[in-house]
Amino acid sequence: MERQHQRKGWKSKGAAAFAALLVIAGCGAGGNGGSGNEGGAAASPSATAQPLKEIKVVLDWTPNTNHTGLYVAAAQGMWEKRGLDVEIVQPPESGADQMVASGAAEFGVGTQEGLTLAREQDIPLVSLAAVIQHNTSGFASPADKNITEPKDFEGYTYGGWGSPAEEAVIGSMMKEQGADVGKVNIVNMGMADFFTAVQKDIDFAWIFYAWTGIEAEQRGIPINMVYLSDFNEQLDYYTPVLETSEKMIAEQPDVVRAFVEGASEGYEYAIEHPAEAADILLEAVPDLNAELVKESQEWLAGKYQDDAPRWGEQKREVWSGYAEFLREHDLLKKELDIDAMFTNEFLPE
């Protein structure tokens, strides 16, 4: 879940991912995602008498508690009863966006950041649900560096993954306090582990607290967190999200509805039963750190839905606010159709 352990940060994935997406944009986003709806019966519980519709959902990085609801849905038959046989797969180096855009996977775990930039390149990805209602990411540093607010970034080295958005985000937060992002040394630390990197040549990095922050607690390593959403409401965007393509929505809406309803049931279970949900994730992925998963799951249980009327619901102002932030920092060159970028249509009432 962190920017190091789940590094597809901008779904980021740096220049390679967007280069791949540009190739897809040039040849169309059809792929093999529109393979028919098999009579439209896939979304109905009565369809269980029929062969299950096989589909894929690709993660954004290695399995973690951002994904628990998906593993719950798979383990407890929440998709099967809706006529779906869902395979959860890990992404290629270029990320989930490319697989979903090309049709290699029907659904994926993405971010508002990556999807927004994909839409600028005319890659028709659509967000179906917000996995977590508010942005729980921020800039973490060892407590002894005394970096407790954006102005403290001056004179320190930030380790990122090479996205132009990083400097824009850091700079906007610092500007609010009259500080200068030009006084921050920004370096690309690639896939380096946060805990290793801060012992060497960086001072702070972008992480998700629910994974790396909790791991720091368990290791007995004090850290300070500077959360994005505390300093700029435009940065309280959705990360991660469940995504699909416009083609899937147009050609197989019943499959989309069945997938989203099953995922919603899985995340609702994780909200209500975090300990049991953690066990389900660990059973599916036994190599994960069990204590980290359990504590992370407990922390996230109240974050998935938070103050939204239902799990997954998205607000237009969140999508338009982040797009405006990108335009203000010259990272978005054209106007986007905000309403085409997300939908709440397939969420259960």
Image: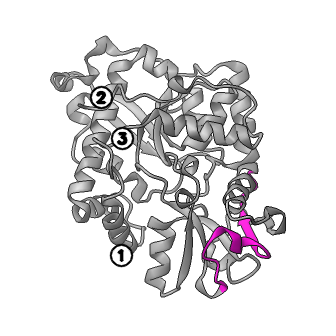
- Tell me if 260 is positioned left or right of 23 in this view: left
Residue 338 lies, with reference to residue 174, above or below; the image says: above
Q: Residue at x 75, y 66 (%)?
A: 179
Query: Could you tell me how many numbered marks the image carries?
Result: 3
Q: Is residue 14 magenta?
A: no
Residue of label 1: 291
- The x, y position of residue 305, in whole percent, is 32, 49
Q: Which label was assigned to residue 258? A: 2
- Which secondary structure lies at badge 2? helix
In this view, the residue in front, 186 or 215, is: 186
How packed mark 1 is, by other alpha carbons closer than 10 Å (few <14, some 14-19, many 20 or more), is few
Q: Amino acid at mark 1?
A: Glu
- Tell me if 275 is positioned left or right of 337 in this view: left
Q: Residue at x 73, y 58 (%)?
A: 171
Q: Earlier in the sequence, mark 1 or mark 3?
A: 1
- The x, y position of residue 321, in whole percent, is 57, 39
Q: Is residue 107 visible?
A: no
Q: Which residues are magenta?
A: 145-163
- The x, y position of residue 157, in whole percent, is 77, 73
Residue 129 lies, with reference to residue 205, above or below; the image says: above
Cα distance in 3D space between marks 3 and 2:
15 Å
Which quadrant of the structure image shows residue 242?
A: top left
Q: Which label was assigned to residue 312? A: 3
Q: Earlier in the sequence, mark 3 or mark 2?
A: 2
